[in-house]
Image (tube, helix red, strand yellow):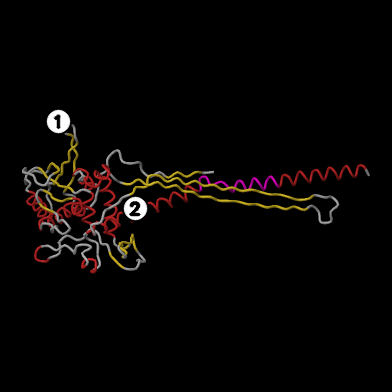
């Protein structure tokens, strides 16, 4: 009898150890589910990229529309994003153990948990000297020509970023604006065809005196088809360039008195935004109420000859298929998702604004994900 009781005690002790191990394994498995770690990077990084990109487009479209109404533009940069996750869990285990119980041991298990996500987002307003520099400083001509060398369409770049080139004037918007010179449209069309034919190129040279980099635009002298040769001669004639040269120095300015120099007066970021705002459709009642100006007309009532860089539509209701949409003055202003040219103008605008930034720009957006 004593041996039987002793054996039952041993078995009961072993059962308690097994059950204890079971409880421990359950608790450890639950604690393992509380870790985010690397999987959160895949999810959150893309989510924040999409969110920042969407808000960037909305901010710039809103400011383009506001400038169409002569309203004050406001810019906020995303300074920092800190996303901290916290998951807390508790396990409660209770039970009774009896060797004489008809129903055996009784076990109760309970769990509770709490999930917390507290993202902290900081914004840096563009203001003061930095605001003036980014929005009011003209783009450096070498940077503009570098984009041409990289394959960006020369006609779109010049239409948005150039005010004058060797005395030939682009248009201006607003009540005191004017349409572009006829020769400006002809020049852009000829340059575009020369770019496609790889007749124009770019070279960067280091000045021996000032030790600064200078830009040289090349116009090839090789034999070409009659149509391309005609475009080449037209560009030389409009810009007043010598026909026996193929290298021409690029400088900043509205005019040049030399036949081997191309003077380019570029636009600042604020003017580019204003010019894009001229292509915003506005309700007739807003024009009648003098909230904004009517579409710009050239002399003789002819609309400016250059195609719009961007098309912004206006509707009372929110559009269903928009690349970007913002609400202003009780109207929705939006860009069609199938408008490839207008969507490209947004990418171009981002690059243009970046080219005007200082080296000591505010810190780029930082996404910090805390993994438990």
Task: Quickly name the residue at label 1.
Answer: 209
Q: Nearer the viewer, residue 45 or 242?
A: 45
**Horizontal side, residue 307 vs residue 56: left or right:** left
Q: What stretch is highlighted in magenta?
A: 23-39
> Which residue does the image show at 60% across and 51% down from the upper left?
113
Q: Measured from the top left, where is residue 305 in percent x and y?
A: 15, 61
> Which residue does the image show at 87% across and 43% down from the upper left?
7
CA–CA distance in space, label 2 to label 1: 42 Å
**Quadrant including the N terminus:** top right
**Horizontal side, residue 51 vs residue 2: left or right:** left
Q: Which of 328 and 226 is in front in this view?
A: 328
Task: Quickly name the residue at label 2.
Answer: 56
**Quadrant including the C terminus:** top right
Instruction: Give the answer, above or below, for where 304 lies relative to 268.
Output: below
Q: Is mark 2 on a helix, strand or loop?
A: helix
Q: Which of 197 and 24 is in front in this view?
A: 24
Crowd class of label 1 (few under 14; some 14 to 19; many from 20; radius 10 Å): few
Q: Measured from the top left, where is residue 173 in percent x and y?
A: 17, 57
Which of labels 2 and 1 is toward the front?
A: 2
Q: In which quarter of the image is residue 276?
A: bottom left
Question: Considering only order in the chain, which callout, 1 or 2, is on the residue closer to the N terminus?
Answer: 2
Instruction: Give the answer, above or below, for where 209 lies relative to 368.
Output: above
């Amino acid at each position: 009898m004593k041996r039987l009781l002793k054996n039952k005690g041993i078995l009961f002790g072993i059962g308690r150890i097994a059950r204890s191990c079971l409880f421990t394994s359950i608790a450890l498995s639950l604690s393992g589910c509380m870790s985010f770690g690397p999987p959160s990077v895949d999810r959150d990084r893309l989510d924040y990229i999409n969110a920042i990109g969407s808000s960037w487009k909305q901010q710039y479209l809103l400011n383009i529309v506001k400038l169409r109404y002569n309203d004050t533009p406001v810019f906020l940069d995303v300074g920092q994003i800190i996303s901290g996750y916290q998951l807390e869990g508790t396990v409660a285990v209770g039970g009774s153990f009896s060797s004489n119980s008809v129903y055996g041991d009784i076990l109760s298990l309970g769990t509770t948990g709490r999930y917390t996500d507290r993202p902290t987002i900081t914004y840096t307003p563009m203001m003061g000297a930095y605001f003036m520099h980014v929005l009011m400083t003209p783009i450096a001509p070498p940077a503009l020509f570098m984009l041409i060398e990289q394959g960006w369409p020369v006609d779109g770049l010049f239409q948005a970023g150039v005010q004058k080139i060797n005395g030939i004037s682009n248009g201006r918007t607003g009540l005191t604006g004017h349409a572009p010179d006829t020769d400006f449209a002809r020049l852009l069309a000829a340059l575009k065809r020369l770019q496609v034919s790889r007749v124009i190129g770019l070279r960067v040279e280091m000045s021996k005196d000032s030790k600064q980099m200078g830009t040289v635009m090349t116009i090839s002298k090789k034999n070409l088809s009659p149509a391309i040769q005609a475009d080449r001669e037209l560009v030389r004639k409009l810009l007043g360039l010598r026909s026996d040269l193929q290298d021409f120095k690029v400088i900043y300015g509205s005019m040049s008195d030399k036949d081997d120099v191309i003077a380019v007066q570029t636009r600042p970021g604020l003017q580019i935004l204003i010019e894009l705002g001229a292509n915003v459709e506005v309700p007739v009642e807003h024009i009648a109420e003098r909230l904004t100006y009517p579409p710009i007309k050239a002399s003789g009532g002819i609309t400016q000859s250059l195609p719009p860089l961007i098309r912004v539509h206006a509707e009372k209701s929110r559009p269903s298929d928009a690349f970007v949409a913002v609400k202003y003055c009780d109207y929705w202003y939006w860009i069609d998702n199938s408008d490839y040219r207008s969507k490209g103008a947004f990418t171009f605008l981002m690059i243009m604004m970046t080219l005007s930034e200082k080296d000591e720009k505010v810190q780029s957006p930082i996404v910090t994900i805390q993994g438990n």
